[in-house]
């Protein structure tokens, strides 16, 4: 059964709620916790980066070179990866509930080939490790064996790993090892197969950004306040 427009909207709304209740509060909390001691500073590089970014090595520039990459990159990627299972659980509810099969997150009818897929979801193209290969292949092998016994009629292409974001060419070697046995579908292709909408991936990504506007969050103000705090610490220390 193909996903309806109402279900698509429900996925978008659940994604926005995921950002509203998990990602954004964690992001702001991580920003507010930052102190100069939070950073493992290379004094050679940080002075260069400050000059490269701002044209000087004043405390404010040093603070920006520390805070910007941490709060706009590293900490947010970590938070998303740690909390993505919550979004996957919400996705389960929208597409028909969690699969009762061990190792399978969601089951859905593929909008492209019309076959029922048994899908294990992952966050992004670099988010699994070597040990995950055997785990995923073990779950899928068990399901294929069960299919033969129960005459479920499964094909190898019916067991998939769905990667929520990213591009196929950026998949890690660990994903490629799985893809040699079972399809790894990634980013826009995953969401198109799930929803039947080739633009849904981009609609969903856009919706995450809309939460900041909807909730009136002034991220630039929060970041500037933290930059000023860190700059004051640098001044009191006499520089970096």
Image (cartoon, helix red, strand yellow):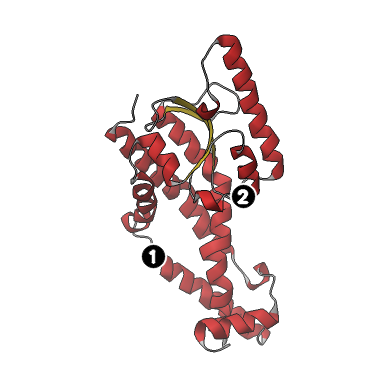
- Image check: 5 left or right of 188? left
User: What number of labels is visible?
Assistant: 2
Q: Is residue 127 above or below residue 162?
A: below
Q: Nearer the viewer, mark 2 or mark 1?
A: 2
Residue at the disc numbered 2 = 172
Q: Residue at x 58, y 47 (%)?
A: 82
Residue at x-position 67% and y-position 39%: 132
Q: Within the image, what quadrant is residue 109 found in?
A: top left
Residue 73 position (above or below residue 192): below
Residue positioned 37% across, 57% down in the render? 212
- Residue 185 drawn at (x, y percent): 50, 40
- Tell me where residue 90 sits by quadrant: top left
Examine the rendering and report whether any part of residue 50 can be seen: yes
Mark-to-mark CA distance, 2 and 1? 35 Å
Report the residue marked by disc 1: 218
Secondary structure beneath disc 1?
loop
């Amino acid at each position: 059964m193909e996903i309806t427009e109402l279900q698509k909207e429900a996925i978008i709304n659940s994604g926005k709620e995921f950002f509203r209740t998990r990602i954004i509060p964690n992001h702001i909390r991580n920003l507010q916790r930052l102190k100069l001691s939070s950073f493992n500073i290379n004094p050679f590089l940080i002075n260069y980066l400050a000059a490269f970014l701002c044209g000087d090595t004043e405390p404010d520039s040093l603070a920006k070179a520390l805070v910007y990459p941490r709060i706009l990159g590293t900490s947010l990627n970590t938070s998303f990866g740690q909390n993505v299972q919550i979004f996957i659980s919400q996705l389960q509810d929208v597409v028909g509930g969690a699969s009762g099969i061990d190792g399978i997150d969601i089951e859905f009818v593929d909008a492209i080939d019309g076959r029922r897929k048994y899908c294990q979801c992952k966050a992004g193209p670099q988010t699994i490790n070597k040990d995950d290969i055997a785990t995923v292949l073990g779950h899928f092998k068990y399901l294929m064996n069960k299919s033969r016994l129960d005459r479920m009629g499964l094909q190898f292409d019916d067991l998939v790993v769905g990667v929520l974001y990213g591009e196929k060419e950026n998949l890690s070697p660990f994903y490629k090892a799985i893809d040699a046995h079972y399809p790894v579908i990634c980013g826009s292709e995953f969401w198109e197969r799930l929803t039947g909408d080739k633009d849904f991936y981009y609609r969903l990504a856009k919706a995450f950004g809309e939460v900041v506007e909807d909730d009136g969050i002034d991220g630039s103000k929060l970041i500037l306040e933290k930059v000023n705090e860190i700059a004051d610490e640098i001044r009191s220390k006499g520089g970096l």
